[in-house]
Image (cartoon, rainbow, N blue to C red):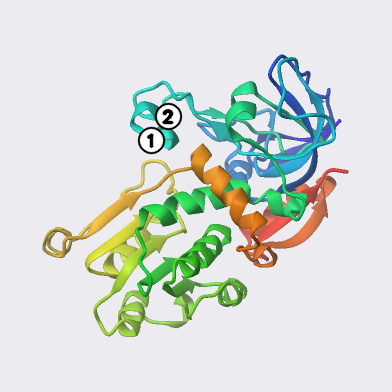
Amino acid sequence: MKAAILYGPKDVRLEEIDIPKVSSGEILVKIEAALTCGTDAKVFLRGGHPRMITPPAVFGHEFAGIVAKAGDGVEKFQEGMKVVAANSAPCNRCFYCRRGKQSLCEDLLFINGAYAQYINIPSRIVEQNLHLVPENVSSREASLVEPLACALHGIETANIETGDTVVINGAGPIGLMFTQLAKLKGAYVISCDMVKERLNMAEKSGADEVINVSEVDDEVSAVRKLTGGFGVDVGIEAVGNPAVWEKTVSMARKGGTVVLFGGCAPGTKFTLDTEFIHYGELTLKGIFHHTPYYVEKALKLLQLRRINTSCLITGELPLEKLEEALNKIISHQGVKTAVVPW
């Protein structure tokens, strides 16, 4: 099969490799679409990921396709079924899993390899995080399940109430998902970014106000002005930049909640105003990854057509042009690109 192999920083090569073998409990999926993602772009730039991939290896993790072969013991899925898999599954036995924190699982099993024609799904993921794709959802759309599940995890912990004002810093793929999910909660949404095209997508996703941070002297003041000086009920950081983490905290009102979702580079730190946190009674929440519960809910939202997928998938390229697709997300051209391996 054709597969994109990552060898190091910005070193991806399209090669012919063996189709993965299927063992008991596993499933081989013929990939119909794989999406580009900010995490995959970081993996491409850095040449790997400490938790998920050590080169040389096939990478990519947002995908959907057709069951090509089911291993012994698999009963729910059969050849020819259209399926989508999340990129991980918890152990359900460790300290954190037993406390309902499956995203913090000490033995979280990850898979990569979506930038290829076939991918093998391990039995643990088959059991917990592999789903049939509804008839009204395309494989391109179904591939949004994994990032949408992550955004759902973040939005649910924000405890947004109808009529709340929410600022979302970052209008990339995750930021746009947060915008749509916050609107479903009945919130008034302010979207901040420095790329005009993405702010246009934020408006199409339902944002009530957009702020181009490259055109204002102080985005914190700009957000506070829109809230009568009080600040927002909920602030969400979807960039992964310590400076933006700090600004998101500063945009919150007293008693507000801040969701710090964007993953920053290892070793980075950010500064807090202790007086504001203490006397303002702020709640700060770090959010990582998803759980099987959110994966299932994400697929349901897609089935119900509650998510505007046209704002999230803005292009399509063949597997041979994967590097071009990754460079698009790196240079903020469009949002996500569907990579088609056939």
Q: Amino acid at mark 2?
A: Cys
Can residue 271 be seen from the camera position used here?
Answer: no
Observer-nearest residue: 151 or 307? Answer: 307
Can residue 310 be seen from the camera position used here?
Answer: yes
Relative to 233, is 25 on the left or the right? right
Image quarter (top left, top right, bottom left or bottom right) of the C terminus = top right
Q: Position of residue 199 (x, y in %)?
A: 56, 75
Q: Position of residue 254 (x, y in %)?
A: 20, 68
Residue at 69% x, 29% y is 57
Q: Is residue 94 above or below residue 137?
A: above
Q: Position of residue 225 (x, y in %)?
A: 31, 84
Q: Nearer the viewer, mark 2 or mark 1?
A: 1
Q: Quadrant of residue 336?
A: bottom right
Q: Position of residue 43 (x, y in %)?
A: 59, 41
Residue at 53% x, 66% y is 180
Q: Amino acid at mark 1?
A: Lys
Residue at 68% x, 18% y is 25
Residue ID for mark 1: 101
Spatial distance from mark 2 to mark 1, Cα to Cα?
Answer: 7 Å
Q: Is residue 176 above or below residue 46?
A: below
Disc 2 + disc 1, Cβ < 8 Å: yes
Q: Residues within 10 Å of mark 2 (few under 14, many from 20)?
A: many
Residue ID for mark 2: 105
